[in-house]
Image: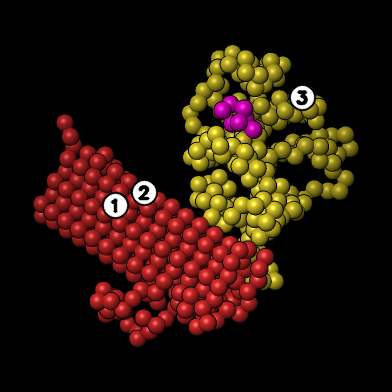
Amino acid sequence: MEKEMISKKELLELTGISYGQLYRWKRKNLIPEEWFVKRSSFTGQETFFPKEKILARIEKIIGMKEDLSLADLAEVFSPDVSQIRFSRIGILERNIVSEYTLNFYEEINGWAEEYDFQSLLNAFVLHKLLSSGDVNLEEARSICKLLKEAFEKSSETSWTIYVTRKLGVASVFAIETNSKPLFEESVKITVKLELSSCVEELKIILS
Amino acid sequence: MANDLKVMGDMTLPGGKFDNIRISGELELNGDTVVENDVKVSGNCQVNGDLKTNGLKISGRCVVEGNLESGETNLSGHLKAKGDISGKSMSVSGIARIGGKANVDLLTIFGEFSTSGDCNSEEIKAKGVVKIGGMLNAGKIELKLYYTSTIKEIGGGSVIIKRGGESAIGRMFKSLFVGSDYFSGKVECDLIEGDSVYLEYVKAPIVRGSNVKIGPGCEIGVVEYTGEFYADPDSKVDKEVKV
């Protein structure tokens, strides 16, 4: 499951950005260091990026550049989340998750007046998956519990959620994002969701 | 009431939180230390742990076993940090050796500066010897270097590397280094990429940029440029490609 990569050269040509810009965004952590992948090539060492991710990120940076300072942008993309609390009423008013999803989440975790970022993220992920119809209620319940456990182990940005189905039986996995799991041929992957992009999405909605 | 620490003579203390630290003599702090305002050293200071301060002024020697976080650093003498350093500005007149990486917005060096990791700055101006084990990523790079300088990779906006001259100060540096080719060696880099690049006496296999100007004394493998390219007849460029 190799993702398509794009060389630095091609990237600059395609997007029209300069070396100075690329390096400045790297300094400001707008482009994560891990995305700079060094590979040996015909001309020596060349740097490659995950194509989809980098193009999307650059589009976002350019799009938001006018409104936010680089430091603000870094806040949006940074994996660190501060101690913010969200009220239940606020979440529903702003339509971040549907009431249905919130009730569903609370059935498993108990009612709460306030949500911290990770719980909100958990509910947000459920909201996405339930609305899209990619998972059924049983799978959603498993995902909810698994996410809670995963967040306790490590930050929300290091996980990718997989839902697989084989012979009608579904399983849910939380796998470290940089791993490349190998599934049997007969296994169908119904959901592959990178939490880091959910975090970004959620942050943009909240900002 | 301010928690100021004033040391005259020799002292060893546990680390901790202070408002100001003034040393005229020798101070050893055993533990992480946080200073609200400034640390002023006239003599010797050793922190066995991390040091976080608003300002650091050294006339003498300062060793930090851990990481150094200092808003504004003024060094006249010797600074050694085994971990990472970060701050808004650092001015080095002497020798600064960093074990980890450096994230300093404005870096001014007169003397020797070395890191084993990356160096990230908005602007770096150096005259002397620079050794960077990782990548030098800076918006504006202006270096006047002597040959024992090696920078693994350079990336940024404007990159200017020249050779330090044979001035009196240059000769002073030479006396500190063995080897007659101190003034005649070349700065070595694996890769240089920038918007505008000007190089003198640099040896690099790959140079990429919008506008690349190769001055005298260079040995370059491949130059890839998008805008303008010029190479001094004195230099060797194996291949130039307009991309």
Residue drawn at x 17%, y 34% as measured from the top left: B2
Q: Residue A127: x percent and y percent?
A: 71, 25
Q: Is residue B53 above or below residue B108?
A: above
Q: Which residues are magenta?
A: A201-207
Q: Where B233 sits versus B169, above or below?
A: below
Q: Nearer the viewer, residue A162 or A194?
A: A194
Question: Judging from the image, what secondary structure is the residue with disc 1 in?
Answer: strand
Asked whether residue B180 is in view, the answer is yes
User: Helix, strand, or loop for circle 2?
Assistant: strand
**Is disc 3 in contact with disc 2, using a CB cutoff of under 8 Å?**
no
Q: Could you say which is closer to the camera, residue B79 or residue A15?
A: A15
Judging by colour alone, the chain drawn in yellow in this rendered image is A
Q: Is residue B8 left or right of residue B54?
A: left
Can residue A49 be spotted in the picture? no
List the residue tagged with mark 1.
B73
Task: Count residues near mark 2 (Cα–Cα under 10 Å), then give few for <14, some for 14-19, many for 20+.
Answer: many
Amino acid type, callout 1: Thr
In the visual, does B140 lie left or right of A43? left
